[in-house]
Image (tube, helix red, strand yellow):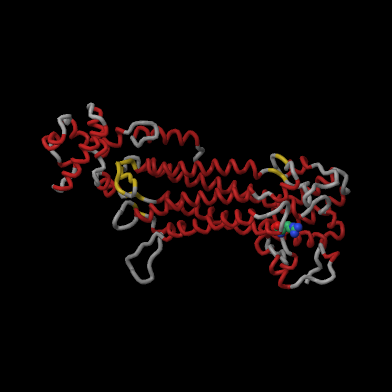
Amino acid sequence: SEKKLWGGRFKESTDRLVEKYTESVSYDKRLAPFDIAGSIAHVTMLGKQGILKEDEVSKIVSGLNEILKEIESGKFEWKEELEDVHMNIEKKLTEKVGPVGGKLHTGRSRNDQVATDVRLYVRHEIENILELLKRIRKAFFIQAKKYIDVVMPGYTHLQIAQPVLYSHHMLAYYHMFKRDEERFKDTLKRVNVMPLGSAALAGTSYPLDRKFTAELLKFDSISRNSMDAVSDRDFVAETIFNCALVMTHLSRLSEELILWSTEEFSFINLPDAFCTGSSIMPQKKNPDVSELTRGKTGRVYGDLISILTILKGLPLTYNRDLQEDKEPLFDAIDTVKLALAVNAKIVEEMIPNKERMKTQASKGFSLATDIADYLAKKGVPFREAHRIVGEIVAYCLDCEKSLEELSIEEFKRFSDAFEHDVLNLMSVEGSINSRNITGGTAKEQILKELEKIEDEENFN
Ligand code: ARG
């Protein structure tokens, strides 16, 4: 077994089982580029402050750069018995550049080091997620624009409620993913704070220039309490929460796409490339991607519960429990990235079944509210109008008619307020376009909204 970098005070070597139990390198090696960037910045600052000599700094920096290349080309040999990414790299550095490598850790602890690495990693990944969020928003925007004349039933309680534009439905999702963007951007403010200089927990006696290191690493600010800095993982919890909420939105979308692609709904055609077949039933085209998205939402919720539970009982400051922050974080980020990418493509390529949606849009007496509003505008109190139209619906159900099939005489049987013009109401498009209010489904509003989105976003 490798000699431990912290082995000085130990008489026995670590139990093999303990090495297996405590290691994190099998998964935290993905932090390597950030660990090396952090180390290079730290050692550069040590040089500037005269804590290390310039030739020491350049030896360490070139050693670290060599290690980075080895890692990137897959040549680097990771060792479980060296615990984590930090120890693996530092050990390799001393092998490469000799004892001077041991000066890298001056004024630093793994506690502020790992907190820094994770922040750099999260910052990087949030940038990626922001790109993917934009891609899926663009997909909804394109659908909304392309199928601007498609009408469909809007639902409450999964019962047909009122007709809406398909575009309006698409843009509802656009807004969910817009809020997700805002949340991630806001989280970035709290992520982009540098812990280096906090050392183990109490700060350090070396005259570090923390602001200089922060500038090199493009941190907006430096932490103001060393004890908080080494034990704070709020930013991890927040990031996972943001991922969980993105998954919630994707899961609701998936549920709708699964429903819409059934024979019973037949609202939508999912692209073949995003469906899978059955090993026994030759006719099947299954929406597995959407089902998996719904399922993977559960695992990201699990990641969120993990991090919150890990944190809840921790006394200040660093405790090894914190090492368990990484797997849920990585899992949430990996899952949300893939889910966003694949769902953006589905949304881009799905095709609404215009005729079927239109047929269904007027089913379920979806124009009943329009008739009640008509009566109310003629002076009938809305509650009264509501009752009258309810009776008309009951009548229609009894004689198996739709509202559109009623004559003016039949309408008049229920209220004197009905005039011939009530028959003009019997159109889905008319109903939609009458909701011409900001946020409403009228085509005019959707066109305005599309323009606004195009202005605000930089889709290209
Ligand atoms: N692998 C550890 C982690 O992720 C690094 C910090 C270890 N610090 C310590 N004092 N044991 O939390």
Question: Residue 5, image x and y in percent?
Answer: 81, 63
Q: Position of residue 439 (x, y in %)?
A: 39, 34
Q: Residue at x 85, y 70 (%)?
A: 11
Res 195 seen here: yes
Q: Position of residue 244 (x, y in %)?
A: 53, 51
Most foreground residue, 369 or 49: 369
Relative placement, left or right, of 102 versus 149 is: right
Position above or below: 443 against 121: above
Task: Please indicate whether residue 412 sits to the left or right of residue 209 in the image.
Answer: left
Give the residue at x 51% y 49%: 245
Return the x and y of residue 364 as percentages of the image width and height.
Answer: 25, 46
In the displayed structure image, the side of residue 140 where residue 425 appears, left or right: left
**Can residue 67 be seen from the camera position used here?**
no
Which residue is at the front of the view, 398 or 249? 398
* Image quadrant, ligand 1: bottom right
Task: Give the farthest residue toward the left.
Answer: 409
When the figure is inspected, residue 356 is found, relative to residue 411, above or below; the finding is below
Residue at x 53% of width, y 53% of height: 336
Q: Quarter holding the N terminus?
A: bottom right
- Residue sitting at x 65%, y 62%: 27
Number of on-image labels = 0
